[in-house]
Image: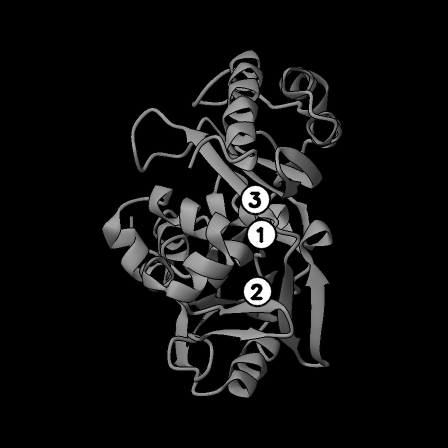
Amino acid sequence: MKPAPFAYERARSLDQAIELIAGTEDARLLAGGQSLIATLNMRLSRPQLIVDINRVPGLDRISLSNGQIEIGALVRYAQAERSAEVATHAPLIAKALPFIGHPAIRNRGTIGGSIAFGDPAAELPTCFVALDGEAVIAGPSGTRVVKADTFYKGLFESALTPHDVLTAIRIPVATSETRTGFAELARRHGDYAMVGLAASARAAGKALSDVRLAFFGVGTTPVRARTAEAALAAGDVDAAAKAVATDLDPSDDVQASSAVKRQLAGVLIQRAARQLMGEEA
């Protein structure tokens, strides 16, 4: 199919981008376009205006400040994959990036696009939650910061309003105590995962604290498995794996049934636990 007719504007500054989307009843931002173009072509989206932000300066930077790594919204997956700063200071994101689609997608797709779109089956929104990150959002009233735990509201719904631009995400810099784990199960590499898990914790030897277990592919947003988090912090991996039966309530979908998803989630808890305890890379 072809998209419905729309107007196109290329923003040269962040202020211009905000002005353009604020002045149109139904506008969409174009960054990497890996989700937007597909929804346009299938006519799931019929915006009046597309605002291209690829020429907005300053949104493609990775920087360190105040104990956080800031990743600009226009940073491409491939750029982040090659970044020594991401590998060192945000290792969970570095672990997840190779699982996203294929090289052609990673060459164009953007970090900000994935976070803003909020596909509940995608890797990066869940890593964002697992790492207790925060979103930097610019809008007509200025700039605000929203924590990851309150950013996602429902299926493809977030704290972003139609007149907002996500400019960056910030993640606490990894320390010597930081442990991360990532695992997903897909029918083949590059497909949406049947179930996936992003995990982070602080470690003293094999003892864990501040455990955060966020699943994707099991709900309308990234899902924290809080009972499993408490069990893993107490050192009981088996109890954590069993806790997904109450922590998660996935629906049947084309990937797997609800029962299969719960079973696979328990397997991923065990795999992630080995990574968090330093038993597996």
Q: Report the amino acid beneath label 2.
A: Ile
* Closer to the eye: label 1 or 3: 3
Q: Are marks 3 and 2 in contact (CB under 8 Å)?
A: no
Q: Is residue 6 left or right of residue 269?
A: left
Where is residue 64, by image quadrant? bottom right
Residue pointed to by mark 1: 128
Is 140 situated above or below 261?
below
Where is residue 81, by image quadrant? bottom left
The answer to which of marks 1 and 3 sits earlier in the sequence is: 1
Seen at 59% across and 22% down, the residue is 251
Q: Is residue 248 left or right of residue 122?
A: right
Q: Report the amino acid beneath label 1.
A: Phe
Is 185 situated above or below 118?
above
Q: Residues within 10 Å of mark 2 (few under 14, many from 20)?
A: many
Q: Secondary structure at mark 2?
A: strand
Seen at 57% across and 80% down, the residue is 18
Q: Residues within 10 Å of mark 3 (few under 14, many from 20)?
A: many
Residue pointed to by mark 2: 169
Residue pointed to by mark 3: 179
Seen at 24% across and 51% down, the residue is 103
Image x and y of residue 107, in percent: 28, 59
Q: Quadrant of the C terminus?
A: top left
Is 162 situated above or below 102?
below
Pick the front one: 18 or 115: 115
Is residue 241 in view from this perspective?
yes
Q: Are marks 1 and 2 in contact (CB under 8 Å)?
A: yes
Is residue 163 in view from this perspective?
no
> How many numbered marks are there?
3
Image x and y of residue 208, in percent: 68, 36
Q: Secondary structure at mark 1?
A: helix
